[in-house]
Image (cartoon, rainbow, N blue to C red):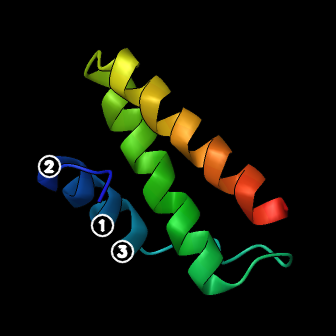
Amino acid sequence: PLLTEEEMGYYRRGRNAHAHHGVPKNATHEQYAKATGLEALVGYLYLSGQEQRLQCLMEQIVLAHEEEAH
C-alpha cells in the first residue's frame, strides 16, 4: 500500500530478475528476491532524483523493522 503502481513495477522487475551467481548461503531465495526488488526500487528513486520519496520509504522500512523486533 505504500508504493505507487510505477514503484511497484520497478520492485517487481528487480525481484523477478534471475540471479546469475546464486542466492547467498545465509538467505532464502524469497529473501534474496525481495532484497533485489528493494535494491531496484532504491536505485530507480535515487537515479530519478526522487530523494524525498526514497527517504520517506526508508523511514517506513526502519519503523516496520523496529516494530517487528519488539
Front in this rendered view, residue 18 or 40: 40
SS for dot 1: helix
Counting residues from the start of the chain, the first of labels 2 and 3 encountered is 2
Q: In the image, which disc is placed on residue 12?
A: 1
User: Considering the image in quadrants, where does the N terminus appear?
Assistant: bottom left
- The amino acid beneath tag 3 is Asn
Return the x and y of residue 52 as percentages of the image width and height: 37, 17
Residue drawn at x 13%, y 55% as measured from the top left:
5
| Crowding near the residue tagged with mark 3, few <14, some 14–19, many ≥20 C-alpha atoms within 10 Å | few
| Crowding near the residue tagged with mark 1, few <14, some 14–19, many ≥20 C-alpha atoms within 10 Å | some
Q: Nearer the viewer, mark 3 or mark 1?
A: 1
Residue 45 visible from this viewpoint: yes
Q: Left of 32 or right of it: where is 68?
A: right
- The amino acid beneath tag 2 is Glu
- The amino acid beneath tag 1 is Arg
| Crowding near the residue tagged with mark 2, few <14, some 14–19, many ≥20 C-alpha atoms within 10 Å | few
Q: Separation of disc 2 and disc 1 at Cα?
A: 10 Å
Residue 20 visible from this viewpoint: no
Residue drawn at x 86%, y 75% as measured from the top left:
26
Q: Left of 27 or right of it: where is 50?
A: left
Name the residue carrying label 3.
16
Q: Nearer the viewer, mark 2 or mark 3?
A: 2
Return the x and y of residue 22 as percentages of the image width and height: 65, 77
Question: Residues at badges 2 and 1 in contact (C-beta under 8 Å)?
Answer: no
Name the residue carrying label 2.
6
Q: Left of 37 or right of it: where is 20?
A: right
